[in-house]
């Protein structure tokens, strides 16, 4: 089996939660029967699994395929199966929102952590298209929450590199001190709870804490004092999914690590459960190891490197993309940035209902047909196959003069 995922970041196998969950599933059920190939190819939604003649995109499809192959044998009863379905649905509908805010919507986290992580695993041209598209998609998913105060790049430009003393340029220190003293006498020195809540930054903090509590508290209640969520002897598929999302919340070192701090301080059992699963499934990854594996010419060289450096995950190399494939990927990324024609914030639904070819490519087909009609019309007129209507000769109507009848008419005139 070959599993294609987005590359590693933050010490995890991937920067994408569903890709991490797919790796965890294969680490649990088929640790020696698959190869892990990093990619940024957008022709198939990731994670993408090739198993013989089977081609599967999306975490749910991969998990279903492993179950059909009898690789997943958790021995769950009916109650545990129902609980697993409920937990999986809860994770898929709530966890991604927190990851979007933590990794993409917050400007400092995106600029100082997420964007550099993409730069390590993507070729130069993909860095101009893939990270901005992921951030735009995250903004769309979180737009209904109204959390905009942490998006400082929409309010003012970055001034982190301003020189020392910049705030004091053009200000009189004594005048400022006197003004502040008079203002404190008039307005009072203490802020009330109401004034604090009315500030946008404090309102955003309360919203973030509420979102984190609404997601983490039910999970910790379901875990209780159990080792695993379904009270089994070992981890199951639902533990793999939970570990993937919680790992991206807990392990990244971010400038604004409000989510990881909340987990470690208020949900310690959940944090310990995530770390335990991370060790059990051997999900530690290093982006530098991947860079070395990419330069291995053959699969045997990649295996030798993994054994020499004790790399647990079965990283492998795919055939290098051709120049045409690289140009196609770059061109599609640029096309999606064009207003109206492109789709810069397109959301890929990994387990959506399958539509027909014409439905999925309607925009492309209409654009192709219009272009072909315009080109055909131009060539037809240019080659003379179709004549452009020039009209008939001009007729002038009016009373004839004697001179119009030749020399006899001129003599009579």
Image (cartoon, grey):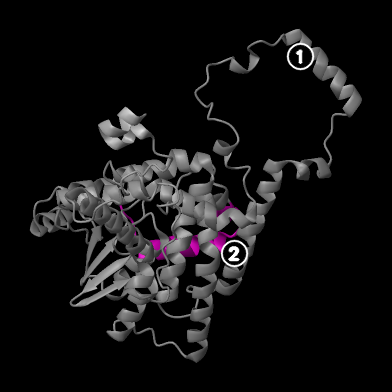
Residue 269, magenta (yes or no)? yes
Numbered badge on residue 290:
none
Which image quarter: residue 112? Answer: top left
* Between 267 and 213, the one nearer to me in the picture: 213
Furthest-bottom residue in view?
Answer: 78
Rendered location of residue 136, percent (x, y): 48, 50
Give the residue at mark 2: 215
Image location (x, y in percent) of residue 43? 28, 61
Q: Is residue 111 visible?
A: yes
Q: Nearer the viewer, mark 1 or mark 2?
A: 1
- Is residue 282 in sight in this rendering? no
Looking at the image, tell me whether mark 1 or mark 2 is earlier in sequence order.
Answer: 1
Residue drawn where x is 27% and y is 55% of the image: 377
Give the magenta-colored segment's residue range.
262-285
Residue on which the image places disc 1? 176
Which residue appears at 40% of the width and 68% of the height? Answer: 350
């Amino acid at each position: 089996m070959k599993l294609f995922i987005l590359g590693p970041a933050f010490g995890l196998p991937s920067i994408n939660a569903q890709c991490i969950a797919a790796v965890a599933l294969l680490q649990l059920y088929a640790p020696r029967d698959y190869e892990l190939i990093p990619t940024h190819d957008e022709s198939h939604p990731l994670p993408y699994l090739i198993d013989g003649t089977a081609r599967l995109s999306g975490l749910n499809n991969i998990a279903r395929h492993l179950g059909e192959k009898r690789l997943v044998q958790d021995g769950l009863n009916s109650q545990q199966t129902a609980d697993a379905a409920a937990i999986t649905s809860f994770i898929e509908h709530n966890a991604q929102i927190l990851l979007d805010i933590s990794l993409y919507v917050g400007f400092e986290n995106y600029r100082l952590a997420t964007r550099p992580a993409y730069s390590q695993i993507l070729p130069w041209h993909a860095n101009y298209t893939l990270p901005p598209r992921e951030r735009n998609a995250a903004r769309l998913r979180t737009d209904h929450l109204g959390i905009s105060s942490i998006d400082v790049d929409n309010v003012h430009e970055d001034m982190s590199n301003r020189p020392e003393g910049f705030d004091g340029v053009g200000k009189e220190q004594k005048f400022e001190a006197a003004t502040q003293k008079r203002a404190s006498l008039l307005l009072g020195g203490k802020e009330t709870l109401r004034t604090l809540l009315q500030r946008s930054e404090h309102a955003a903090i309360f919203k973030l804490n509420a979102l984190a509590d609404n997601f983490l508290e039910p999970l910790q209640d379901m875990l209780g004092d159990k080792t695993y969520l379904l009270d089994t002897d070992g981890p199951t598929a639902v533990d793999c999914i939970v570990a993937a999302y919680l790992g991206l919340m807990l392990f990244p070192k971010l400038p604004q690590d409000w989510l990881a701090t909340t987990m470690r301080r208020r949900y310690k059992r959940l944090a310990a459960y995530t770390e335990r699963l991370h060790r059990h499934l051997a999900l530690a990854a290093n982006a530098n190891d991947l860079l070395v594996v990419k330069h291995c010419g053959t699969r045997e060289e990649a295996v030798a490197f993994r054994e020499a450096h004790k790399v647990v995950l079965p990283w492998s190399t795919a055939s290098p993309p051709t120049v045409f494939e690289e140009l196609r990927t770059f061109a599609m990324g640029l096309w999606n940035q064009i207003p109206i024609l492109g789709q810069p914030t397109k959301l890929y639904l990994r387990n959506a209902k399958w539509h027909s070819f014409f439905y999925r490519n309607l925009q492309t087909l209409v654009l192709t047909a219009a272009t072909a009609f315009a080109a055909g019309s131009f060539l037809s007129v240019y080659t003379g196959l179709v004549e452009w209507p020039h009209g008939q000769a001009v007729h002038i109507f009016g009373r004839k003069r004697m001179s119009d009848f030749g020399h006899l008419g001129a003599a009579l005139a």
